[in-house]
Structures are given as structure tokens and as C-alpha cells.
Image (cartoon, rainbow, N blue to C red):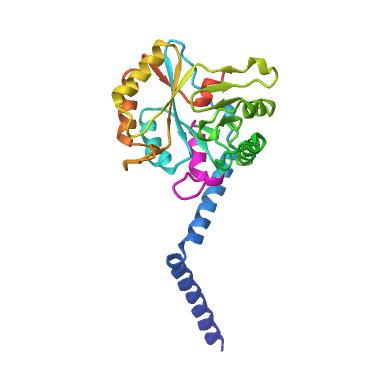
Amino acid sequence: AYMKLFNIKRFNIATILAAFSLSIFMYPRPILFLSQTVKDFREAIKLSNYDSNNETAELIDEDRTQVVFMFDGGWKSVYSDAYPILKKYGYKGSISIIPSLVNEAEHLSYSQIGELYMNGWSVLNHSYSYKTSTDCYKMLKEFQLAMDWMEKRFLTKGKKMAVIPYGCNNPYLIKLLIDAGYDNVRTQDNVIVLDATNPKNTIYYPITIIGLNQDSEFSEVKSYLFKAMNEERGIAFVMNKIGQTYDRYGTTYSPDQLRELLEYIHANEDKFQVVTYTDLFASS
């Protein structure tokens, strides 16, 4: 009787294991979700013990032109393609994340964002769901939800640095962001430094915003660099996806283009200094 019971138990365990293995192939999404949840949990533990305030900011060299590489939307290709290229030259970038899209297809996972953050990248507030509205209070709520999401997940350094969806410059929203204590706002064309203690001190930061895509000629990009240098302004290159596939919407910049640009800047480090977005304001 004992052997019969043992054989039944062994059969049941084997059946369960076989069913579980089969479910991985038949229903992979729950398994992938569980795997990602475990990765995110591990990353959250690391981040909870990481103090970004102890991270030494890149000191701004007034004799060189500051260059910022910004990646909007939190696309996964930033981690897979841009991150290794920048790392090769010892450079760090800045990502604007949309929390509602984190862990979604083609977007960065929380664990990937955490790795970038702990390697000195700036992580900025691109609103919670990238929804736009004529109601500025709804837009403020979007940023507040994103800030709360970042706060709870230990991504605190850039939580009050807002990147407006589609770059819209709405003075009424800017006023609400000032009152809510945000540090700065990046629009399509400008960076606005905010001051809640004295709104009159709100100023435009001296930086040029340049969007890059696969139609951007390298000669044109170089001219932007030297124009910024001659005007004694910083320059922020804004990208979305990184990839080889041509994108008719103009949201993709190829790895080869990025590599060529970085190689040129690296060869001219006496003129240009690559910094993150938060580095620009570290001493202010």
C-alpha cells in the first residue's frame, strides 16, 4: 500500500511538472510576467540601498560646451543599443520615462531603468501616461502621478524635472508646476528653470534643444555643435528610439549615427563635455 501511495505521489509530481513545463510554451506571458516581477523586486532592493545624492555630479567645465544626450519615451532600444555605445566612451545619458508604459512591449523595464539610474543616468518625469489635455490641472496630475511612482520606486533624483509631452509650452501649466515645487521644465525648444520661492526668478536655461532622427545629416549636427559653442550655450540632443529600421514618423536614430556623433565628440573633448541633464543643475 505504501509503495502504491508513493508511486501515485511520484506520478502526480511528474504530471504537475509536465503541465507546468507545457504551460510555459502554451501561455508564456504569465511566466514572463513572473520573471520580470522577480527582476523588478531585486532591482527595487538595490535601489532602496542606493543614495543618488552621494553620486558625484560631473563638474561643469565653463571652458567647454556641455552636451546632453536625452532619450524620450523610455524605449527599450535605449538600453539595448544606446547604453552600450555611450558606455564605451564613458558617457552617461538622460531618459524621460512614462511610468504607465514601463515593462510594456518595446519599453524599458523597471530593472533596466534602475540599472541606468545606478550607473549615473538621469531619469526624468515625462508624465504618467503621456496624455495631453487643455485642462492644465489634469496635466499637473499626470506629472504628480509620475512623481509619486518614481518616489515609491526609489528613482528620486529627477522626479521634479518635467519633460512636457509633445514639447508643448503652456504658460498656465508652467505656473502650476512652479507652485508644485518642480525644479525645471523641458519643452520642445527650451529648458525653463523654476523657482517656487520667487517665481520672478524663473528663467530660460541657456541651452539649445535639437531633435535627432535618421534624416539628420552629420554635417548638420556638427554645425549645431559649433553654433552652440560660439553662442556659449549648452546643447541637448533629443532622441526617441534607437534602431536601424527607417521610421517615417521621425522618432528613430540609428546606432551608427549615434556612434559617429559620439566618436566626433570624443575626439574633440577639449571643446565639448558630455553631461547628464541633472548635472546641469547640480550646483544651482
Vertical placement of residue 140 versus 195, above or below: below
- The answer to whether 103 appears left or right of 90 in the picture is right
Name of the residue lying farthest toward the bottom: 1
Which range of residues does the magenta coloring cover?
100-121
Q: Position of residue 259 (x, y in %)?
A: 32, 31
**Residue at position x 50%, y 34% in the image:** 166
The answer to which of 283 and 254 lies nearer the viewer is: 254
Compare residues 1 and 180 and report the one nearer the observer.
180
Viewed as shown, does residue 265 lie left or right of 6? left
Give coordinates of residue 255: x percent, y percent.
33, 36
Estimate the x, y position of residue 274 in percent, counting from the top left. Answer: 42, 22
The answer to whether residue 60 is seen in the rendering is yes
Instruction: Note whether 101 is above or below 66 in the view shown.
Output: below
Instruction: Find out whether residue 118 is within the magenta segment.
Output: yes
Q: Residue at x 70, y 19 (%)?
A: 197
Quadrant in which the N terminus is drawn:
bottom right
